[in-house]
Amino acid sequence: MPKSGKNRILSLDQATYNCGWSIFDDRNLIKYGIYHLSNDEEIVRINKLKNWFISMISNWKPDYVAIEGIQYQDEVAGKGKMGITVFQTLARLQGVLLDTCYDLKIPVEVCPTNTWRNHCGVKGRYRADKKKSMQLLAKEWYNVDLSDDEADAIGIGHYFSDK
């Protein structure tokens, strides 16, 4: 997809089931979506996501890739926290994405969740509140109705496009 001299950012709210993504040219959101993966075993999902990611890079030709950092949160029932198994899966996925960018010579940066959320003005005490807040911000900024995965990918891209 032609860039017409603009700085293109591909941002990911990476996960091995529903990976939110967005494309920014300079500070303009031009495309977004979710890549859905099936219930295959973890290594199969990671491999499918890597191959999809390579095709996104090939098709969109980003100048830069932005991905969300991961953080371990003690699992608490009903609080939306991740346990050690999910954290380990996301760590493996993040390593694959970083290595893929290295192989393809695409600059990549990992950003802590709190950093991009603070920059965007995301409000809320709990994870669900923060997700909803980002959806409302994306609606205000870009007039789009989004899933929380898409909204987070747009928040990450918004942060990096301002950076």
Image: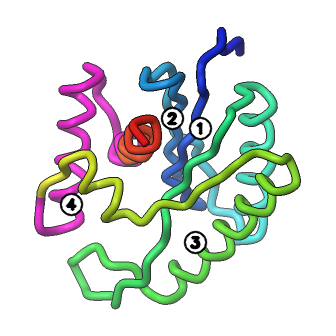
The amino acid marked with disc number 1 is: Leu
> Which residue does the numbered mark 4 point to in the structure image?
128
> Which residue does the numbered mark 2 point to in the structure image?
22
Q: Are marks 1 and 4 in contact (CB under 8 Å)?
A: no
SS for dot 1: strand
Which mark is first along the chain, 4 or 3? 3
The amino acid marked with disc number 4 is: Ala
The amino acid marked with disc number 2 is: Ser
Q: Image point 76% across, 26% down: which residue? A: 59
> Which residue does the numbered mark 1 point to in the structure image?
10
**Rendered-image quadrant of the N terminus:** top right
On screen, residue 54 above or below 44: above
Distance Cα–Cα, label 3 vs label 2: 19 Å
Residue density around tag 3, few if under 14, some if 14–19, many if 20 or more, within 10 Å: many
Residue density around tag 2, few if under 14, some if 14–19, many if 20 or more, within 10 Å: many
Which mark is first along the chain, 4 or 1? 1
- Total number of numbered labels? 4
Residue 161 coordinates in the image, percent (x, y): 45, 35
Q: Are marks 1 and 3 in contact (CB under 8 Å)?
A: no
On screen, residue 42 above or below 51: below
Q: Image point 22% across, 77% down: which residue? A: 79
The residue stretch that appears in magenta: 124-151
Colouring: rainbow
> Which residue does the numbered mark 3 point to in the structure image?
90
Q: Are marks 2 and 1 in contact (CB under 8 Å)?
A: yes
What is the quadrant of residue 81 in the picture? bottom left
Q: Of residues 87 and 7, which is closer to you in this image? A: 7
